[in-house]
Image (spheres, rainbow, N blue to C red):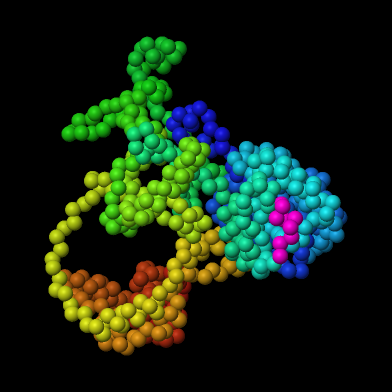
Amino acid sequence: MNSDDERDENNIPDWKGCPGSVILINVLDSSRNTAANAHAATCEMLKQYLRISSAHNIAVCLYGIEDTQTSALGAKSVVEVFPLTSGTLDNFQKLRNINLSQYKPAKDFQLSDVLWHCSKLFTNCKRQLSSRSVIMLTRLDTPPVPSDHKPTLKRVVDLVDSNIEIRVINVAEGDYKIDPFYEQFLKEVNKGRDYVLPAPVWNVTEIEKVMHQQTHRHLAVSHLNFEIGNGMSIGVGLYNLLIKSPLYQQKRVNLERETNAIVSSVTKTMKVTTDNEDILAMDVDEEESGPRQVPLLKSEILFYQEYGGEKVEFTDAEMKKLRNPFGPPMMKLLGFKPARVMSKERWFLKSGYFLFPNEGLVEGSTLTFNAMHKALVETGTVGICCLGTRLNCKPTIVALSPCKHPLGLNIETGFDVIQIPFVENVRDIPAIDDVEESNVTEEKKILMGDVIKKLHIDYKPDMFENPKLQSTYKAIEAIALEEEDVQPYVDTTIPNPEKFAGVKEDLFEELFGPFEQAAPKRSTSSKDSGASSKKAKGEEIDTSLLQERIQCETVHQYTVAQLKEILKNTGNSDIPALTGLKKNELVDLVYQFCS
């Protein structure tokens, strides 16, 4: 994105607008269920955007159909499910309820009109877009009619020149021969650069993942100059690969009881003045003179910090200097340390970042970045740096650990940015008494080795889903979509019993003891026993008083706890469960079973 002078001065990213994506689903070949899988994946992606309340603008269109219908913009062979807008519940229901079988495949397939329709969608969007992309879900073996080849390629060039990215997702069950037209199509999309033919994907979940990757903006947390030495800097981008679920980030909203309107609060800073000049300046009657509340100016506000029992005061300007005495955002190399002294788990303070070169800031940064990555891998070292991501951000000490393919992404070179503590964050570990080492026999080692091998799993970042989030989202979606039943979800955190089938439990229990030991029984102290006996004695019911109240029909004078105790002491098995019964119902039961 273009940057203004202020951003160039401070290297602060200027994010303006929201991303926009047009999703095109090809329904030309309906016999292979290509459109059905693409439709299901699009529904799942839109549902994810609804969950996170994303501001991403999305439009969905169907193409490859007969010219019986036209879109809202007049393009033939295109059905616009909904225009370019942020995700709403109505749009999701429109997309989910659409019947693909009602559309007949086009006899004369023309792709140029489809791309022209995408261009009009971006032009007519009234919101400011930070990025524009077209996602095509299609097979690559059915080209448009020969007369439409040149117009289609020309449309591609026009879209690419307008900074509109075109991405193709090959929805297919297996490998097949790709038509030469689509090879030329992809060549124009990549402006003649080398490209890789998209691999076929068929699973709905995999298609959804690819769509998320293609529509993501990949915005950096910060673009920085990485100072390696005096007078030597390279451009880098700092990225956050992990995000917190928006369900935990949503703020609490107060609503008015009767109208459900959002209640907003306004904070006003006032001062009490008795100065006659201030009162005269406000043109106040003499009768109303006296102490009054007037707005407090920002320049009149003072901050303070208690130190030694005294309040040290600061003005607003002094407070700004205290908060940011470190200058603009920066990243400086302090030195190198062996990788064995670093432990991501041990020094974990908060979620780290991912570092990647940025040629836009300094030309030649990629070459230097790759050379540094290779040198650290070969020497087994990590870089220690000082990092400040924002103008008002306090600098932190980080370690640069070389990595490849973080979280399964197709990235060959990069650094994990690990936050490490300052001296003030490190606590002295108390001395631990030496524990006598138990004798570990060779038989125990072999048994534990077998257990580890049997329970070995190939871990991937997307293996486990948060069961609490999934259950909450399913319940919310069932209410929002007015579904009778809540969709079930698979709890991936439950261990697979089949993996534990081969574990030798008898031998394990014989060598290491029982799996579950009974909790030791605690002896009741005399104080507790006395309190319990007093409590039991206080709950005894006088039978003569009970019969007297039954005759006088004054049983309602007992409390609920006493009524339950009376019914329990009868020992009658016909008495129903007492949990949840109201007092009137308990009184009726006493008259029925105790009279």
Residue occupying the point 33% across, 48% down? 383
Q: Position of residue 59 (x, y in %)?
A: 68, 49
Residue 315, position as x, y percentages in the image: 32, 25
Front-most of residues 437 and 287:
437
Q: Quadrant of residue 200?
A: bottom right
Q: In this view, does 218 lie above or below 268?
A: below
Does residue 230 appear in the picture of this structure? Answer: yes
At which x and y percent is residue 582? Answer: 45, 69
Q: Visible in this render: residue 349?
A: no
Q: In the rendered view of the protein, which quadrant contains the N terminus?
A: top right
Residue 182 drawn in magenta: yes
Residue 23 or 254: which is nearer the viewer? 23
Q: Does 586 lie within the magenta span? A: no
The one nearer the camera, 241 or 184, is 184
Residue at image x 21%, y 80%? Answer: 440
Residue 486 shown left or right of residue 36 in the figure: left
- Asked if 415 appears above or below 478 in the picture, the reply is above
Image spot of residue 584 (x, y percent): 46, 70
**Residue at point 37%, 11% (across, down):** 277
Q: Quadrant of the C terminus?
A: bottom left
State whether the magenta stretch is mostly helix, strand or loop.
helix
17 above or below 574?
above
Residue range corresponding to the magenta coloring = 177-185
Residue 163 left/right relative to 235: right
